[in-house]
């Protein structure tokens, strides 16, 4: 677009975009070849070719006045981005502009003109239009009868102006968090807190896959597709990895938790540098836990990109199709586990510290279900995919039944558990997991509303984790893991327990917090996960966007709008914290990073979705009639009821 045209005019020739071309991207290498880093390689050729391909020669000598005089007026961040260097292998590895791709490499916009206007801020927002209209009406009233406009009208206009200023600030901060590789945007760092010392950054200066999801959705809803496309393709290149953790290689298909753009000396030339993408699969993380959710989120974002941009060429690429299959094979691999849910270790998802969620945590199961549906929609029909699609469909049926039947709890189910008989041995046992009724905690008896219900956090033999986990429940609504009745019941519970789950800042990551001796045993006396802090009952503003998608799907957007209104009272003033502490979320988290990117992006996505609810369809997945029919068959023909005999050729799962 404008950026590419300006670069082309300076160079005086027609050149491919830095990353938009599939051909140039493939030159980086196969996504399944082991490598230490993804590198931006040096190429021989004329100087202008070296400029585009990240040469080691600095081009700061370009006459900026002449550069800008040849183009139309520039806006804000875009004008600033023109002045950035495109060097990757030079001693000053700055990054180039990020906002658009070339038309010559295939349009990534459904409507180029409209998208270009929205990117450059030329499209008036609905809220801005409403403010102007209301002020105009008030002025006309004043002119007609000589009286001042009603106080309510003026107050509403001021409130909307304040909302717009918060959104503008959020967009500015989100763009400042963007990370560039070889001059192209590839993601957003976890946090850009100016108050943190360089010695206390930890890994917050890296691009996390799970953290980038709300950022990527925000850019998609804004019509800015390049950064999401680059992120998808570059993380795909990092999928296969030769590093080991304690001499053990990660499973093939595992996506990294995060990556960092590093500038390192060029091989054989100490005077020059190059940029490399250095991923972390958990070998450097606190607790050394590999991420299970990264690959699942990657598939969800890939589908959202295609549905939002209309560019299906990315998901149709051979390397991307192979990447999807590798993730699925890793998740669908046979093992000792006898349940259709995905078995994972503690700390392998958003809750990345010891919190007693090992086994089959709800968050992973909802993301797993969502990724399976998204992958089935994107997988190309071919002979090599037939067995994988068959296994995928079988798992979807079994997983849906298992979660809906055994994870669901409301007052009716609570009464059933209270009267459970234990030590049942038979295929027809009622208490299939040998749950002891004494596990029902007093807090749950008092907390469970008469109207509403939710999916428990975990289920294992002789153990039910009755805690309410927000992400797992909300995403179960989004991906249709729950029935319509169950989905409405979850939202009913959120409304009924508003002061507990939302309070002064949305949204509790889990409820209730672990306290006392239980906290000491389960968390290992984790000083960061003290009661009502961090992952132990802390409040996370980034969960706003998942709440918005779930509410829009169930046609109850007023719940999310109310939560956004609560957040707007403090989140900007508090400098966009990572999380909040205390039961009512009254304090900024004791170790919370400020200007946390996914807090910023979560707010923006919620606002964008509520302004245009139909755009939530890029994230929502629905059950089809075939899956519903198969689900009914699973209920009527439970494999536990079958007599023992020769092994069936058809693969089944215990549900």
Image: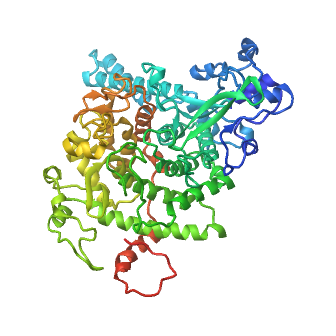
Q: How is the image coloured?
A: rainbow
| Count of all numbered marks drawn on residues in the image | 0
Q: Residue at x 65, y 23 (%)?
A: 94
Query: Can the viewer see residue 114 in this picture?
Result: no
Q: Residue at x 55, y 51 (%)?
A: 248
Q: For residue 133, what is the image quadrant?
A: top left
Q: Is residue 195 left or right of residue 466?
A: right
Residue 640 lies, with reference to residue 493, above or below; the image says: below
Q: Residue 630 location in percent, x, y?
A: 43, 74
Q: Is residue 341 left or right of residue 177?
A: left
Residue 320 lies, with reference to residue 187, above or below; the image says: below
Foreground residue, 641 or 455? 641
Q: Residue at x 31, y 26 (%)?
A: 570
Foreground residue, 635 or 339? 339
Q: Residue 369 location in percent, x, y?
A: 44, 59
Residue 363 lies, with reference to residue 276, above or below; the image says: below
Foreground residue, 558 or 185? 185
């Amino acid at each position: 677009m404008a950026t590419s045209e300006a670069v082309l005019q300076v160079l005086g020739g027609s050149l491919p975009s830095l990353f938009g071309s599939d051909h140039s991207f493939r030159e980086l290498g196969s996504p399944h070849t082991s490598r230490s880093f993804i590198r931006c390689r040096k190429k021989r050729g004329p100087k202008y070719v070296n400029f585009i391909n990240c040469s080691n020669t600095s081009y700061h000598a370009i006459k900026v006045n002449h550069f800008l005089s040849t183009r139309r007026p520039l806006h804000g961040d875009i004008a600033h981005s023109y002045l950035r260097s495109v060097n990757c292998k030079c001693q000053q590895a700055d990054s180039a502009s990020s906002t658009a791709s070339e038309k010559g490499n295939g349009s990534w916009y459904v409507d180029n003109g409209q998208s270009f206007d929205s990117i450059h801020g030329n499209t008036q927002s609905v809220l801005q239009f409403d403010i102007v209209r209301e002020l105009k009406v008030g002025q006309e009233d004043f002119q007609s009868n000589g009286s001042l406009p009603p106080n309510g009208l003026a107050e509403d206009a001021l409130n909307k102006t304040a909302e717009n200023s918060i959104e503008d600030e959020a967009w500015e901060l989100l763009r400042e968090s963007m990370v560039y590789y070889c001059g192209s945007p590839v993601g957003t760092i976890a946090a850009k807190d100016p108050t943190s010392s360089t010695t206390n950054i930890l890994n917050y200066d890296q691009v996390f896959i799970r953290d980038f999801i709300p950022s990527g959705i925000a850019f998609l809803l804004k019509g800015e597709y390049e950064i999401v496309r680059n992120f998808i393709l570059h993380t795909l290149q990092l999928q296969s990895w030769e590093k080991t953790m304690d001499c053990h290689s990660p499973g093939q298909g595992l996506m990294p938790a995060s990556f960092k753009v590093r500038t390192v000396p060029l091989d054989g030339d100490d005077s020059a540098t190059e940029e490399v993408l250095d991923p972390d699969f958990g070998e450097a993380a606190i607790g050394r836990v590999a991420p299970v959710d990264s690959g699942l989120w990657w598939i969800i974002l890939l589908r959202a990109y295609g549905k939002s941009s209309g560019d299906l060429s990315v998901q149709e690429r051979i390397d991307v199709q192979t990447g999807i299959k590798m993730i699925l094979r890793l998740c669908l691999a046979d093992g000792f586990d006898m349940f259709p849910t995905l078995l994972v270790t503690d700390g392998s998802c958003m809750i990345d510290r010891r919190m007693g969620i090992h086994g089959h945590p709800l968050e992973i199961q909802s993301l797993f279900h969502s990724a399976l549906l998204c992958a089935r929609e994107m997988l190309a029909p071919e002979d090599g995919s037939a067995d994988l699609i068959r296994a995928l469909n079988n798992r979807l049926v079994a997983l849906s039944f298992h979660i809906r039947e055994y994870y669901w709890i409301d007052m009716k189910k609570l009464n059933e558990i209270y009267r459970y008989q234990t030590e049942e041995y038979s295929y027809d046992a009622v208490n299939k997991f040998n749950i002891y009724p004494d596990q029902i905690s007093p807090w749950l008896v008092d907390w469970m509303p008469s109207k509403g219900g939710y999916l428990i956090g975990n289920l294992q033999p002789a153990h039910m984790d009755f805690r309410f986990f927000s992400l797992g429940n909300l995403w179960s609504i989004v991906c249709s893991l729950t029935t319509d009745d169950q989905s409405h019941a979850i939202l009913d519970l959120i409304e009924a327990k508003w002061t507990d789950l939302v309070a002064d800042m949305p949204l509790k990551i889990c409820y209730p917090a672990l306290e006392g001796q239980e906290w000491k045993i389960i968390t290992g006396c984790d000083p960061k996960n003290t009661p009502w802090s961090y992952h132990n009952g802390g409040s996370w503003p980034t969960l706003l966007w998942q709440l918005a998608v779930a509410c829009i799907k169930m046609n109850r957007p007023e719940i999310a709008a109310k939560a956004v209104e609560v957040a707007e009272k403090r989140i900007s003033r508090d400098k966009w914290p990572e999380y909040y502490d205390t039961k009512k979320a009254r304090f900024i988290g004791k170790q919370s990073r400020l200007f946390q990117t996914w807090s910023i992006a979560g707010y923006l996505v919620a606002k964008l979705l509520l302004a245009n609810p139909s755009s939530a369809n890029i994230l929502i997945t629905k059950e089809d009639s075939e899956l519903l029919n198969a689900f009914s068959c699973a209920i009527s023909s439970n494999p536990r009821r079958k007599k023992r005999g020769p092994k069936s050729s058809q693969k089944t799962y215990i549900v």
